[in-house]
Amino acid sequence: QVQLVESGGGLVQAGESLRLSCTASRFTSKIGAMGWYRQAPGKQRELVARITDSGTTNYSDSVKGRFTISRDNVKNAVYLQMNSLKAEDTGVYYCSAEVVYILEDPHVGWGQGTQVTVSS
């Protein structure tokens, strides 16, 4: 119901920055909220940041003040600017998007994930 393709992961040193991008395509209805989640080795997937279609954002406490989520509704894209990266930010980052339907529950789609590794 939606295809999400992420890019921008990589290996960086602590204190450096990365910008993740995610573009949605092949969606069958309106795109609602979009977000970024991450999963560290041996841990559950957790919310990093989320943005509604009207631009309201929320962040996990661990990234507030360092990460910024934004979106381009024309391009159907969501971005995550990550500054002052720490070793504990290491993980696979997944893009998500809600596809909103009038008569059905929203469908949440996921990207394939992009690896972010921060060396200390």
Image (tube, helix red, strand yellow):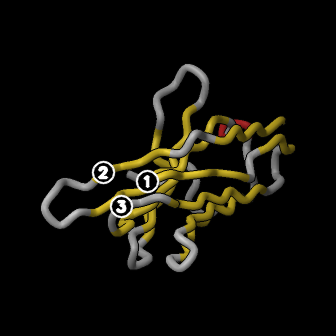
Q: Look at label 1 and name its amino acid.
A: Val
Residue 4: image x %, image y %?
A: 54, 52
Q: Secondary structure at mark 2?
A: strand
In this rendering, is residue 4 above or below 118?
Answer: below
| SS type, badge 1 | loop
Helix, strand, or loop for circle 3?
A: loop
Give the residue pinned by disc 2.
Answer: 107
Q: CA distance from mark 2 to mark 1?
A: 9 Å
The 10 Å Cα crowd at callout 3, few under 14, some 14 to 19, many 20 or more, is few
Q: Is residue 103 above or below residue 44?
A: below
Q: Quadrant of residue 92?
A: top right
Nearest to viewer (mark 3 / mark 2):
3
Decide which of tag 3 and tag 2 comes sooner along the chain: 3
Asked if 62 appears above or below 103 in the picture, the reply is above
Q: Which residue is mark 1?
A: 2
What amino acid is labelled 2 in the image?
Answer: His
- Identify the mark nearer the N-term, 2 or 1: 1
Q: Which mark is residue 28?
A: 3
Q: Position of residue 46 (x, y in %)?
A: 46, 40
- Which amino acid, by three-letter code, is at mark 3? Thr
Residue 65 visible within the image: yes
Question: What separation in Å lies between label 3 and label 2 (alpha carbons)?
Answer: 10 Å
Q: Residue at x 78, y 39 (%)?
A: 118
Q: Position of residue 38 (x, y in %)?
A: 55, 40
For the residues labelled 3 and 1, say whether their Cβ atoms are less than 8 Å apart. yes
